[in-house]
Image: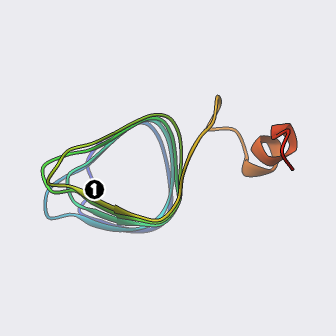
Amino acid sequence: MSYRRNEGQLNASELLISDGAQVECSIIAQDVTVCGRVKGTIRAVRLRLQNGGLVEGDIFHKSLSIDENSQFEGSSRRVENPTEPLTSIAAKDPQK
């Protein structure tokens, strides 16, 4: 699945934000590849920033890779089940 411009929330199993795409929303997906720009929270099992991709926002992930030409500004947190609702993730955090 590939988007050029979207606002709101995206839910998908596999999501590609292609080069030139600009997305402002929260994303929940199993597998996300960002080659364009994303502004918002991403909750994904596997997240890859490639080919100059840019993410501005918080990331909840199980696996994260960032190519050297890509950029990330925000906070990153590894969690076992990132696609679960955030309240479930926070409730299972033993530090809180």
Eyeballing the image, is 71 above or below 29?
Answer: below
Residue 94 position in % (x across, y down): 85, 38
Residue 77 position in % (x across, y down): 58, 46
Q: Which is more toward the observer, 95 or 40?
A: 95
Helix, strand, or loop for circle 1? Answer: loop
Q: How many neighbours does mark 1 have within 10 angstroms: few (below 14), some (14-19), or many (20 or more)?
A: some
> Residue visible at 23% across and 62% down?
4
Name the residue furthest front: 95
Q: Which is more toward the observer, 10 or 72?
A: 72
Residue 67 position in % (x across, y down): 20, 44
Residue ID for mark 1 = 3
Eyeballing the image, is 24 above or below 15?
Answer: below
Res 54 quadrant in image: bottom left
Task: Name the side, left or right, on which 48 lies relative to 88.
Answer: left
Looking at the rendered image, the quarter that the N terminus falls into is: top left
Residue 30 position in % (x across, y down): 48, 32
> Residue visible at 14% across and 57% down?
19
Q: What's the amino acid at mark 1?
A: Tyr
